[in-house]
Amino acid sequence: MSGETQGAAAVDPSALRRTVVVDRARLVDYAAASGDQNPIHQDVAAARAVGLPDVIAHGMWTMGAALDVVTSYVDGDPARILSCGTKFTGMVVVPEGRTVEVLVEGAVRMTDEAAGTQTLELTVTCGGEKVLGRCQAVVRA
Amino acid sequence: MPLNPDFAGREYPPAGPFPVTRAEIAAFADAIGSDNAAHRDPGAAAALGHADVVAPPTFAVRLAQRCEAQLVQDPAAGIDFSRVVHGEEGFTHHRPVVAGDVLHGVLHVDRMREAGGHGMVSTRVELTDQDGRPVTTVTSTIVVRGEA
């Protein structure tokens, strides 16, 4: 329909789509930056000892990388992200020597014009498998 | 050792202080692959109205997990860390975290119970600033996988 109002509907879907990459070095950096030094995110022997196929990314790395798409969507101002949350439903497996791609695709699920907010939902996949569930952010539009 | 349900409802004394630095914020932004200028450049942050560089929306996990350690690393709580997987995480931002903040965190144990052979532990960390005002509420649920 022509003549639709500007604002919430005028979202360029490409603004909410990004491929992010992760390798072992990035996980070491994230462990230091976040303080989460759980060895399953750095050491294959530690990962296998608890039944994992290989080193896996921190769930919080995946969430943080995904949410950066939302920060970009709100013009780089984290103050406009009022809340965000996710469930961790899958693993991002990061073998030695590999660069692994994670695809982030966001969409506006709800617009609350009275409150001036939008609810975004992010679909985050690795190798076609969803790794985050109900990953949402409420932003000031 | 099973979870100790007596910990449910517990509130810990404030942990901290956690001084937040520009270097910490930049390192976190680098690690999540963000190229957003406001995480690194005080001028870019100022243009958005912030007193100093501003943290990514999940940065507070760095501080919250230090608060959660009071519970997770307490042998009396019965949490076998080698069997822990992260279930859920959430952030409510009362205001953004900026460099120069000196934050404290109060850990609350909202839920601690066994369900379907697994342990479920839900915590909430209320981060406040040097004036005692709320900054971020961080909620986390971890699952302690049962013995197979």
Image (tube, grey):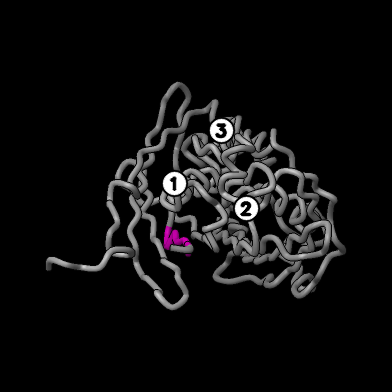
Q: Residues within 10 Å of mark 1 (few under 14, many from 20)?
A: some
Q: Chain of mark 2?
A: B
Mark 2 lies on residue: B84
Whole-angstrom CA distance, mark 1 to mark 3, is 15 Å
**Sequence-wise first label, 2 or 3:** 3
Q: Secondary structure at mark 1?
A: helix
Please name the residue shown 45% across and 56% down the image: A89
Residue A118 image-quadrant placement: bottom left
Residue bounds of the magenta highlight: A133-139
Chain hosting mark 1: A
> At label 1, which amino acid type do we have?
Ser
- Identified at 70% across, 60% down, the residue is B135
Does A66 sit above or below residue A116?
A: above
Q: Residue furthest top?
A: A97
Q: Give the chain of mark 3.
A: B
Say which amino acid is labelled 2: Val
Q: Quadrant of residue A100?
A: top left
SS for dot 2: strand
Mark-to-mark CA distance, 2 and 3: 27 Å
- Residue to which mark 3 is pinned: B30
- The mark found on residue A72 in the picture is 1
